[in-house]
Image: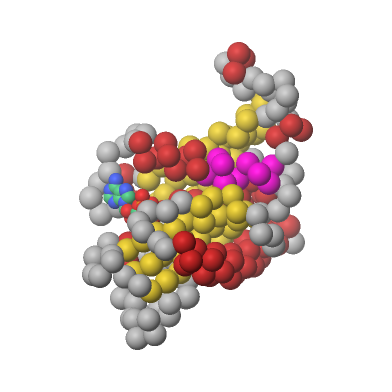
């Protein structure tokens, strides 16, 4: 609906301000920070290195192992530290979103560990985390087909909006809020994550993907710029 106003004053397709920087953790093999407005994710990559215990090693391929978590102070009410069902789910979907661009067969018996921590959460933490992790893998020099870009498109009542913040995720008028986190391989039509939290009509999905594509093009530019900043140093 044309007259719909977002609480942040953004236009329907306007993303929050993005920030990306790589090489933020000197002791990691690769690292990056990525933010959408007040949502800030940091990612560190360690490996590829021999997987222990040895019986978990796969001589045919390496393994990507992601650990995502919200830090206790990232949300208004201190979060109990440690894993939860939510963090386990997001760790898994982040692995699935990133694996298609990696050729893990090049690194038999090894693991690539990716730690993703959310320093500040204002919705869209899995998407910011995927963008940060993708950059950190590239910074670690892991061969990648391309970067992975991730964004959440949502529906507030009947209005499609890009990059929901927490206030929007909690929108409860009309049909309420639907959140549709998406990841795709940059410059391609290959999607590596499609999740849906809420209701959406099948005919609207194409529009959602078109909005995600445009947003991912913008994210890709920010990611490339951050990588260039370190390679040109
Ligand atoms: P995403 O962060 O990817 O949008 P969710 O939809 O699960 O994933 O979470 C939405 C937002 O809800 C988070 O970004 C965060 O702001 C808030 N949130 C999630 N888990 C907690 C928690 N345990 N305590 C407080 N706020 C939380």
Look at the image and name its color scheme.
Answer: secondary structure
Q: Residue furthest bottom?
A: 3
Task: Confirm whether residue 131 shows in the render.
Answer: no
**Which of the two residues, 215 or 81, is positioned nearer the viewer here?**
215
Residue 211 position, x and y percent, is 53, 70
| Residue drawn at (72%, 20%) of the image | 59
Residues shaded magenta: 94-102
> Of 226 and 210, which appears nearest the observer?
210
Residue pushed farthest right? 106
Q: Is residue 161 above or below residue 90?
A: below
Is the C terminus in the top left, top right, bottom left or bottom right quadrant? bottom right
Q: Is residue 113 left or right of residue 109?
A: left
- Determine whether, in the image, residue 186 is placed left or right of residue 82: right
Residue 4 in the image, given as x and y percentages of width and height: 34, 81
User: Camera-side residue: 126 or 233?
Assistant: 126
Query: Residue 73: x, y in percent?
Result: 31, 49
Percent from the top left, x then y, of residue 17?
A: 48, 71
Residue 43 shown in magenta? no
Whether residue 200 appears in this view of the structure is yes
Label the magenta part by its dominant secondary structure.
helix
Residue 109's place in the image compared with 66, above or below, is above
For residue 187, side relative to residue 70 (left or right): right
Going 43% across and 80% down the picture, which residue do you hit?
A: 11
Q: Residue at x 68, y 46 (%)?
A: 101
Q: Residue at x 62, y 68 (%)?
A: 217
Placement of 113 over or under 8, stated as above or below: above
> Which quadrant holds the N terminus?
bottom left
Total labels drawn: 0
């Amino acid at each position: 609906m044309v007259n719909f106003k977002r609480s942040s004053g953004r236009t329907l397709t306007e993303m929050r301000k993005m920030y990306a920087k790589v090489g933020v953790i000197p002791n990691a093999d690769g690292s990056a920070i990525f933010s959408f407005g007040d949502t800030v994710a940091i990612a560190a990559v360690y490996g590829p290195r021999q997987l222990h215990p040895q019986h978990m090693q796969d001589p045919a391929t390496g393994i990507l192992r992601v650990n995502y978590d919200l830090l206790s102070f990232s949300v208004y009410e201190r979060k109990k530290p440690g894993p939860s069902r939510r963090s386990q789910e997001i760790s898994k979907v982040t692995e699935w979103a990133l694996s298609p661009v990696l050729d893990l067969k090049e690194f038999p018996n090894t693991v690539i560990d990716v730690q993703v921590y959310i320093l500040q959460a204002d919705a869209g933490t899995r998407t910011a985390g995927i963008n940060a992790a993708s950059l950190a893998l590239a910074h670690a020099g892991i061969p990648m087909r391309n970067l992975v870009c991730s964004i959440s498109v949502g529906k507030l009542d009947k209005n499609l909006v890009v990059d929901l913040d927490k206030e929007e995720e909690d929108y409860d008028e009309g049909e309420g809020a639907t959140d549709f986190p998406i990841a795709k391989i940059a410059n391609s039509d290959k999607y590596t994550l499609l999740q849906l939290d809420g209701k959406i009509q099948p005919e609207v999905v194409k529009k959602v993907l078109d909005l995600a594509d445009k947003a991912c093009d913008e994210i890709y530019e920010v990611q490339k710029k951050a990588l260039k900043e370190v390679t040109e140093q």
